[in-house]
Amino acid sequence: MTPQSDEDEVWRQIVASFNDTAEHDSADQPWPDSENLPAEPPRRVVKQSDEEDLLREDDPPGDLLDRSGEPPGAEDSADEDPGREDAAGEDEEGHYVPPPPPPLPRTDATTKIAWTALFGGPAYLLLSAALNWNLQGWMLFAAVAAFIGGFVALVVRMGDGPPNDGWDDGAVV
């Protein structure tokens, strides 16, 4: 027998037994004891000070007293809610605050004029079409020329090489 025929026979057996019922129903099988969790008393966290939380396993579950001897829910009406300050401190403690971004590079007047022309020409044409203004031929030419001139000016000023910011340009191809 070839390995291919053995594999074909196994597949035929799998397909033939597809609709067969299982010998043992899973609902009849008992839950294995090794899967049960051990019954441990719940742990209680007692606030000892603002700097540390201590875990007390030896106290009974109902014994929750802080240093003052009062239950954690009992507070004087004159005092502010100290839990609110703790919650705010915990929220700020674990979060990453990124450094402020570096300032944007300064642009010269030529670049600013090119960007204004690039967006100003089409914006003028859209505005005149939306407001149904009557455009003269020289206005239409000026708007299209501003768009093309701004685009060409930005492409020419773009440069064709990587910037030389440091001694190591990395992998420049």
Image: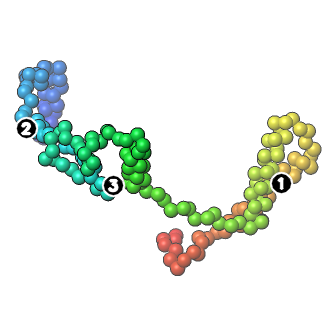
The image quarter containing residue 27 is: top left
Disc 1 and disc 3: Cα gap in Å? 69 Å
Q: Which residue is mark 1?
A: 145
Q: Is residue 81 left or right of residue 162?
A: left
Q: Which residue is mark 3?
A: 50
Q: Position of residue 11 (x, y in %)?
A: 17, 31
Q: Nearer the viewer, residue 166 or 161?
A: 166
Residue 148 in sight here: no
Q: Relative to 51, say whether 129 is above or below.
A: above
Residue 96 in sight here: yes
Q: Is residue 162 left or right of residue 157?
A: left
Q: Relative to 157, say whether 119 is above or below.
A: above
In terms of sequence position, does the residue under pointer 2 or pointer 1 come before the other?
2
What amino acid does circle 1 point to? Ala
Identity of the residue drawn at 13% across and 20% down: 20
Q: Which residue is mark 2?
A: 34
Q: Nearer the viewer, residue 87 or 108?
A: 87
Residue 162 has which mark? none
Identity of the residue drawn at 7% across and 27% down: 30
The image quarter containing residue 160 is: bottom right
Disc 2 and disc 1: Cα gap in Å? 81 Å
Disc 3 and disc 2: Cα gap in Å? 41 Å
